[in-house]
Image (cartoon, rainbow, N blue to C red):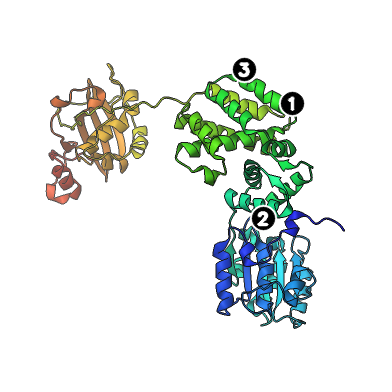
Amino acid sequence: MINQALYRKWRSQSFNDIIGQDHITQTLQNALEMDRIGHAYLFNGPRGTGKTSTARILAKAVNCTGTGKRPCNTCAICRSITEGRQMDLIEIDAASNTSVDDIRDLRDKVGFRPGEVKRKFYIIDETHMLSKSAFNALLKTLEEPPPHVIFVLATTEPEKIPETILSRCQRFDFRRISVEKVAERLAYIMEHEGLKAEKDALLYIARQGSGSMRDSISLLDQLTAYGHDIITLDLVQSVLGTVNQATIQKLVGYLFKRDITVGLALINKVVADGVEPRRFTLAVLEYLRDLLLIMHGQDEVMLGLSVEMAESMRQQTDEISAIDLFHMTKRFSQAVRDFKFGAGETIIPQLPLELAFVDVAINEAQPQVQIQTPVVAAAKPSLTKQSPQRIADTSPIKSQSHQSKHVSKTSSVKLPPPVNDLTVEILRKRWKYILAELRTEGVNFESFFISSAIKSVDIHGHTIYITWRVLGKKWSLEFQSPAMNTPANSIPEPQLSQASSNDTPSVGDDELVKEAMKLGGKFVGREPI
């Protein structure tokens, strides 16, 4: 007799056997008790988490003829489904039956009533692989299903399934199974198989399974075939081609000490021993991640670590700061991606790992320096009757005013280094500081600059004269700025005026003039443009 694989031999046969999906099994059992079974279900989740097994158990429970809790697994219907000989349980692999003809054939057969069961079950695995035409053909059946048919669609990528299909199914999301629960199930299997294994070895297998029960049991099956009396952690790491924790811990210790020479030597020794570089890099990344989580109070049980290993890692976290550990984890994550996208497919397969190690070792995290922004009283514009001398057209200043950021009245202004000679070029560079000073005093001159075209800017010492055009009128502003190295206590009150003009209308004719005067301006005349 051919030996059956462990993952098939120990496949879940009742709701109690489904590990880590209590939110789904409890809901389905309640629906059975209330006789509220739907006509279509969508089971979504990672591979090996129990989607197809749950569908088969649901088929047994719906059609079970036994008394008491369903499924009983003893009646003829339950046994026929368990043994895979029930004709009214149809499993379809959508990955190999993607065409519309396959679904049309299914649709034609749906109308036939079941032979010996109450409800016929169709389990469509990898549903997202169906073609668009196949989905359209399936939609009609899901809209108006026969009363004797139940559909279960299983998928790992629900986003590829049309919304019209999703809306007609009850959706259940299967989760990755925790390392602790997978390890407990593996220990249960080992006990009933009459085999022995170290707890650390089972935890390591569960971690390698990445939350998939089927993958973890398959790894266990591979290890039991090795022929040892007991499965140890060293045996698991040797058979799976991974690096033992002591080596990884040693390498990370060299990384913390910035010891490039010894670290690179250890990397090349491990690779020379036959360890696949990408898997080695991934193991280092997982170790750094565990260190980061332990540093922030994560429990070792949730991480699938032994108490001894967790304590050793806690001691190692004392050698590094959180910011350094964060950057190390981020850099090794990039190294894993480099392997994935072909950067490691060179004559030096371990190159991405070596580069990550050296990069982290020579680039220590920048020290955090707290900078205090000096508090300087904001400038206030003032009006003088000194005739300005036009020296340049500064239209680019307008565009820079758009980029200035809002500063509240209580905010301090961060000033640039002082200058001795004030020029238009320096004014352009420091324009945002000047606007910030104006805003701190509640003077809304910035709106004038944004909505108008600046005609000229004249500079005399540390006094700035600005002339601009807005709403067909020409305005001028004169002010002194601490940003231009002027003492704050010598700055007069802000004033705004319109340039002189022979045509001088009354103040009441112009709303803009009224607003300017509210800001402290004085109306002296209007200049035609």
Which label belongs to residue 272?
Answer: 1
Spot occupied by residue 154 in the image (x, y as percentages of width and height):
67, 63
Q: Is residue 343 visible?
A: no
- Residue 286 lies, in percent from the top left, at 59, 38
The mark that comes first in sequence, 1 or 3, is 3
User: Tag 1, which secondary structure?
Assistant: helix
Q: Secondary structure at mark 2?
A: loop
Mark seen at residue 261: 3
Name the image quarter holding residue 481. Answer: top left
Which sits in the foreground, 67 or 424? 67
Q: Residues within 10 Å of mark 2 (few under 14, many from 20)?
A: some
Where does label 2 land, which residue? 47
- Residue depicted at 17% across the width and 36% down the height: 500
Image height of 14 relative to 529, above or below:
below
Amino acid of disc 3:
Thr
Q: Nearer the viewer, residue 437 or 515?
A: 437
Q: Is residue 183 above or below residue 492?
A: below
Image coords of residue 348 (percent x, y): 72, 26
Give neighbour class at mark 3: few <14, some 14-19, many 20+ (Cα, 10 Å): few
How far apart marks 3 and 2 lie (CA) works out to 42 Å
Label 1 – label 3 distance at C-alpha: 17 Å
Label 1 packing within 10 angstroms: few (<14), some (14-19), many (20+): few
- Which of disc 2 and disc 1 is earlier in sequence? 2
Give the image quarter of residue 358: top right
On the rendered image, what quadrant is the N terminus found in? Answer: bottom right
Camera-side residue of 193 and 31: 193
The amino acid pointed to by label 1 is Ala
Q: Secondary structure at mark 3?
A: helix
x 53%, y 31%: residue:
328
Tell me the kind of residue under disc 2.
Arg
Residue 257 shown left or right of residue 195 in the figure? left
| Relative depth, front residue between 279 and 153 | 279
